[in-house]
Amino acid sequence: MPATRVLELSVANSDLMPQGESVRRAVRWIADQYRDNPGAGFRKLIEEAAIRFDLSPLEVDFLNHNWDKAAPSRDRG
């Protein structure tokens, strides 16, 4: 299963899912960006998503934490 799909499932099924649509939209955007450019680093995409979707520091931490659990080590950069 692709790492982006694992992240989407992890976020969707998490008991810690923050309220609101912004994180779900950010995850979809990150997955789309990564699909179009697999060489893109997820940390960079998360930073861009934080600005694009006006994520709070807690929401960014949530994405980073879930990505660390879902991604193969080669895709964490």
Image: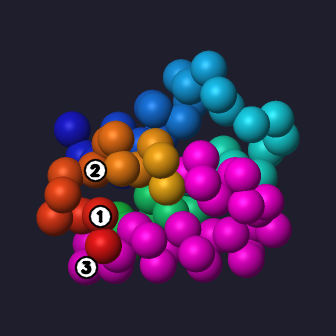
Question: Which mark is first along the chain, 2 or 3?
Answer: 3
Left or right, residue 5 beside residue 45:
left
Region in magenta: 38-63
N-terminal of the pair, mark 3 or mark 1, is 3
Placement of 30 over or under 20, stated as above or below: below
Q: Residue at label 2?
A: 71
Within-10-Å neighbours for mark 1: few <14, some 14–19, many 20+ = some
Residues at discs 3 and 2 in contact (Cβ within 8 Å): no
The answer to whether residue 57 is left or right of residue 46 is right
For the residue pair 25 and 74, the one nearer the viewer reads as 74
Residue 55 placement, left or right of 16: right
Please indicate whether residue 40 sits to the left or right of residue 58 in the image: left
Q: Find out whether the residues at labels 2 and 1 contact each other: C-beta distance under 8 Å.
A: yes
What residue is rendered at 66% in x and 45% in y? Answer: 24
Q: Residue at x 25, y 79 (%)?
A: 39
> What secondary structure is marked by label 3?
loop
Q: Which mark is residue 76?
A: 1
Residue holding disc 3: 39
Q: Residues within 10 Å of mark 3 (few under 14, many from 20)?
A: few
Name the spot of residue 41 as percent of width and height, x first.
35, 75
Task: Kindly identify the amino acid type of the residue bearing the numbered disc 1.
Answer: Arg
* Image quadrant containing the C terminus: bottom left
Local secondary structure at mark 1:
loop
